[in-house]
Amino acid sequence: MTVTIAIDCMGGDHGPVVTVPAALAFVRRHADARVILVGLEGEINRFFSKDGLPGSERSRVFIHHAPEVVEMDDSPALALRNKKASSMRVAIDFVRRNEADACLSGGNSGALMAISRFVLKMLPGIDRPAICAVLPTMKGVVYALDLGANVDCTPEHLFQFGIMGSSLVSAIEHKESPTVGILNIGEEEIKGNEVVKCATELLKNSELNFIGNVEGDGLYKGEADVIVCDGFVGNVALKTSEGVAQMMSFFMRREFTRNPLTKLVALAAMPVLRNFRNSIDHRRYNGASLLGLKGIVFKSHGSADAFAFGHALDRVAETVRGNVLSRIERHVALRQQRLQENS
Amino acid sequence: MTVTIAIDCMGGDHGPVVTVPAALAFVRRHADARVILVGLEGEINRFFSKDGLPGSERSRVFIHHAPEVVEMDDSPALALRNKKASSMRVAIDFVRRNEADACLSGGNSGALMAISRFVLKMLPGIDRPAICAVLPTMKGVVYALDLGANVDCTPEHLFQFGIMGSSLVSAIEHKESPTVGILNIGEEEIKGNEVVKCATELLKNSELNFIGNVEGDGLYKGEADVIVCDGFVGNVALKTSEGVAQMMSFFMRREFTRNPLTKLVALAAMPVLRNFRNSIDHRRYNGASLLGLKGIVFKSHGSADAFAFGHALDRVAETVRGNVLSRIERHVALRQQRLQENS
């Protein structure tokens, strides 16, 4: 199966310097993959002379000129209305016309969400798009959504996040019935707010492999394959996690650089510390999915380097191969059928 | 100034084995402190024969028998109604009768909150009690509330959390005008939900040193002295943080114990690793305040050892010395005055 990905080459903090080499390496890794490099032709072309791709690979790389660029501080409304020839918009248009299977951008998140939603529209039976990212756990990985697209969610929204997250994990991780948990708090008397309680009922009575409440620490213990939560809570959990990781790294660096002796110890411990760093390297987890749209759109972290961008591209390809959209549609159809039977 | 703390000696996973030695060490550290050890007299007494306290210290330790114990799995309602002679209840009663300046318990959180609220009542002008804990940051510490007492909060509640957190930091950390931030998310279009937006307005127009939004990672960067959030979000942030820290420790241990060579490296790195562990040792941050009551009540972590319980006792003493209650009352009075002036 050929996978074609339209890449917004101008997105992210570094633009083509990162996106183009990562795309070429991706094509080299995946013999069945094609990429459409969208952006300022002149800037993209600069990376081809040195790379000297063999013909078989070069034939799977297409360059498509887009004269405009969505800036990081453009408002989503402005980007949507005034930048119809932006690399971001043009890349998404490829998905709408079925000329690409998916699109990846490291650009302005708000604009990417607004344009994707406007251009591609929502899948029937899904009310709101959600941002789903993958995080490391003690046992493997977990997919969490929503991480910031929706601040006020209804139980129905949370339930739909469950459908979408479960479909994504099936597609990428090849698990037919991933476990789904709902992010909740543990205090006896006040287990969860009203929205979480009602969403729990919906999830329980569905065909999803729902395992109930997961607390914040359970997320990283790998208690579930998918965790659903509203975008406010999800975003806070994600950013807080980043904050703790940064703080621990900061303290560790401080101790290992305290004096000549500790620096010597650091030198000796280098290979071990490197392995440790690799196991929590956020670059390996780059690539968040904008789920719920009639098309596959992924967001790369703005600060991603070529290694991180490559990981996002791999994740996009796996999502395409795993037919995530038809998986979501199947869940939605199953649900409609159930609702009709019960009415 | 003499500080008298009533200690629920039966609370926590370990009971008197932890609480009594920690209390005696506390009395030794603080020449102005007295403790009332509440619980099963027989069990508490066992720790005195061996300790052989000198008379000057022994005279500041009081034992008060309480025949009942609130169990970790007792429902708060049951503990409140049926266990009026529990060590927890009796310790709180000492605070109500002004025979103790504060109470510390490592027992059942829900029961501690319910009994404290029933026995002590709320401070005028404060609608809901909140749980406030101290966390490490790259620059020092941060006090965050609410961490789980209230799942659905109004803007007014969040504002009152600001008053209480600010008062607590003034009392413990001796900062006259601590900075107060509100936990929020950064996405452009959707900065915060409605409650957060309205609470921001209230905080802005108050005498608090309000610095605006703080994102999850900003919490650990030490961007503010006090962070307010609703109890659901706060609890998720806290537990998620614990989860990340546990996961990082798990990965680090895994790498350092991988083979004989890495174990040798670990041995060499031991002093450095120990310093690192100390800087994020959660035991140093033990002792969460139940704020908003007409009395000072602290909760120790259930799993606390004597070192952690001692840190909680130190924090309680500092809170008493810093007059946290009159600080809260002063803020509330200032606010009433403002409201009257504006009407």
Image: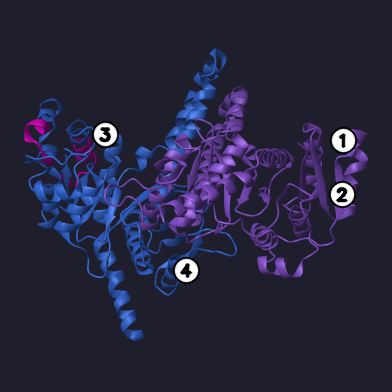
Chain colours: A blue, B purple
* Residue annotated with mark 2: B63
Q: Is residue A91 magenta?
A: no
* Amino acid on which the number 3 mark rests in the picture: Ala
**What label does residue A306 carry, if any?**
3
Viewer-nearest of discs 3 and 2: 2
Label 3 and label 1: CA atoms lie apart by 65 Å
Asked whether, in this view, residue A277 is left or right of residue B320, the answer is left
Same-chain check, marks 2 and 4: no
Residue at image point 91% right, 39% down: B50
Viewer-nearest of discs 1 and 4: 1
Q: Which quarter of the rendered picture does the C terminus of chain A lie within?
A: bottom left
The chain to which mark 2 is attached is: B
Label 3 and label 4: CA atoms lie apart by 42 Å
* Residue annotated with mark 1: B57
**What label does residue A197 carry, if any?**
4
Same-chain check, marks 2 and 1: yes
Assign a secondary structure to mark 4: helix
Viewer-nearest of discs 3 and 1: 1
